[in-house]
Amino acid sequence: MSILDKNISYFPSTAETKKGVSVNLLTLLQSSRHEARIILLRSEIDPAKQKKLKDNLPCFTVAGLFSQRSDAGLITPSGLAAVDLDSAEDYDVLLLLHELKKIPSIAYAGLSCRGKRLFAIIPFLDPTQYARHYERLIRSFEDIGLPMGDTCHKTISQPRYVSFNAPETCFFNHTARPYHLLAPEKIYHPIKTNAISSPCHNPATNRHFVFSLAEAQKWVTETTGYSLIDGQKHNYIFWLSYALRKNGLNETAVYNTIYTNILSADQIRSNAISGGIAHANANGNAMSNLSENTIQPSPKQNISLIEPLASKPSIVINSFSEASALFLQTGQFILDNGDSFSDNIDLPDPEFERPELKPAT
């Protein structure tokens, strides 16, 4: 039985959101029903006419069967996701199509309706975690040099236009291995009192402001992806210490704030706090663009803040001195959490093999 043998919703056009009918995805992918319309579309050289032909094509929702085309209208998930490989247009598309066969999680790949790009269909291990699977899938394609470009299918109800492919312009893998990786789940650790704050001084403005521990915790989770869960605690405390010191708390106050409100001293490796403090000290201990009552949440507005780890491959190092040096050069690091590395470390997927890429002619 094929992993593509699933019922999904088929709509007469993208303008129609409530006139979907149930069709079998595998049958649709193998059908020549739309061959004439796709050939006409691909042969049209006028961009405006081509767009009009494309906009009138039927569409289908790879991710499942829907009562109406909206996330709330999902009836039955297919456990599948569509991927638009817009970057394929820059390369020899047929060679790239052949190379994609090396990735065991791809159940189908073929030319999109215009014939310039590729799209793929990938099964997810846990359909209930569609958004987290898809977010991590974006990273897997980036790691092999094939950014999606268009990540619209991260929305589960997103439709895609029908296409037509002969055997030489597509492939099927009916026993594709479900994609198992998930993006880190963002978990906010509640503080133990309703109002923990410290008066701090921002030298850039020569003004005092009230600094909230909750804001620092939110910044750490949103910016680095770390949470106070097993396997991430050390890195979370490091960056929380960094944020507290960076925004004006003295070193003693950083220790006291964490020991009183987050974890006790015997629950924290000693160099987690000291390392975060040292890293803040090395980069200046006050944000020049900090407003009076908020933590700066965006890593792009201050070069000393870490960028989200999902944006690039992680590098394993073994000491805070190495961490500081590497961070200043690249904006990223992963710290060894003891004798073995945490399962939560976000490394490139070894099953996504980098394809041979030949520029388009």
Image (cartoon, rainbow, N blue to C red):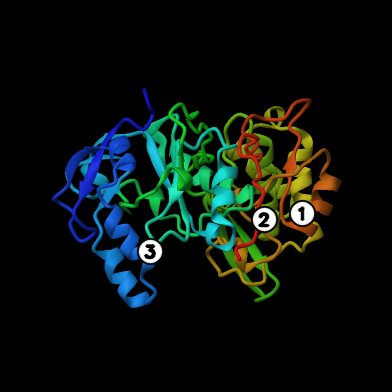
Q: Does dot 2 land on a helix, a strand or a loop?
A: loop
Q: How many marks?
A: 3
Dot placed on the residue nearer the N-terminal end, 2 or 3? 3
| Pointer 1 or 2: first along the chain | 2
Q: Residue placed at 80% from the left, 47% from the top?
A: 323
Q: Which residue is mark 1?
A: 327
The residue where tag 2 is placed is 306
User: Dot 3: few (<14), some (14–19), or many (≥20) neighbours within 10 Å?
Assistant: some
Cβ–Cβ below 8 Å for labels 1 and 2?
yes
Instruction: Give residue 336's quadrant in the image.
Output: top right
Residue sitting at the far right: 321
Amino acid beneath label 1: Phe
Select label 2 or label 3 by which is in front: 3
Q: Which residue is labeled 3 in the image?
A: 42
Marks 1,3: beta carbons within 8 A:
no
Give me the C-alpha separation between circle 1 and circle 2. 8 Å
> In this rendering, is residue 343 above or below 74?
above
| Residue at screen point 46% across, 48% down | 169
Q: CA distance from mark 2 to mark 3?
A: 44 Å
Q: Amino acid at mark 2?
A: Ile
